[in-house]
Image (spheres, rainbow, N blue to C red):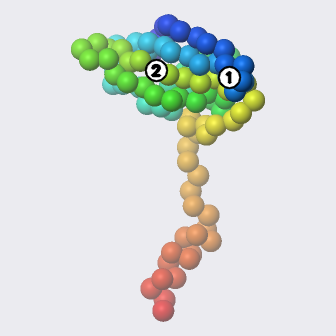
Amino acid sequence: MKAEIIEKKENKIFEREEIKAILKHVGAPTPSLASVQGFMAKLLGTEPKHIEVASVKSLKGADEAEAFIIFWKNKEVEDLTKPKEEPKSEEKKSNGDKNAS
């Protein structure tokens, strides 16, 4: 994947940068939010927890997508690049106890 940043605005009120980019994904499907988050974090030299991918829209008839990304300076968002955690063992037990009555 390659990215071309077409617009970058500093939003001082919310302490963030708002970025519009064209993502080129030749021969591959439209990138997932997690892959865009990881890619943009590397491109901007930060951690994925500071990158919020607001939207990724495929451009019709092209191997490109338009993305709106928010680079937070002080706020952390969910890191989509990490695998989700399994439910705790206590939650599994409570679900299994339903049939015990």
In the picture, measured across the screen, residue 13 lies left or right of residue 4, that is right
SS for callout 1 = strand
Quadrant placement of the N terminus:
top left
Q: In the rendered image, is residue 38 in sight?
A: no
**Residue with the mark numbered 1:** 16
- Tell me the kind of residue under disc 1: Arg
**Residue with the mark numbered 2:** 67
Pointers 1 and 2 in contact (C-beta within 8 Å): no
Q: Which percent across, then down, holds residue 34?
A: 51, 32
Seen from the viewer's position, the closer of residues 96 and 51 is 51
Q: Which percent across, then down, holds residue 55?
A: 46, 28
- Establish if 41 lies above or below 85: above
> Within 10 Å of the Cα at label 1, are there few (<14), some (14-19), or many (20+) other Cα atoms?
some
Q: In the rendered image, is residue 81 in sight?
A: yes
Answer with mark 1 or mark 2, whichever residue precedes in sequence.
Answer: 1
In the picture, measured across the screen, residue 22 lies left or right of residue 79, that is left
Q: Nearer the viewer, mark 1 or mark 2?
A: 1
SS for callout 2 = strand
Q: Residue at x 48, y 92 (%)?
A: 101
Seen from the viewer's position, the closer of residues 30 and 73 is 73
- Establish if 17 lies above or below 99: above
Q: Residue at x 41, y 18 (%)?
A: 66
Q: Which percent across, then down, holds residue 80?
A: 55, 37
> Within 10 Å of the Cα at label 2, are there few (<14), some (14-19), or many (20+) other Cα atoms?
many
Q: Residue at x 50, y 15 (%)?
A: 20
Q: Residue at x 75, y 29 (%)?
A: 74
- Tell me the kind of residue under disc 2: Ala
Query: Would you identify the image quadrant in which residue 14 lies?
Result: top right
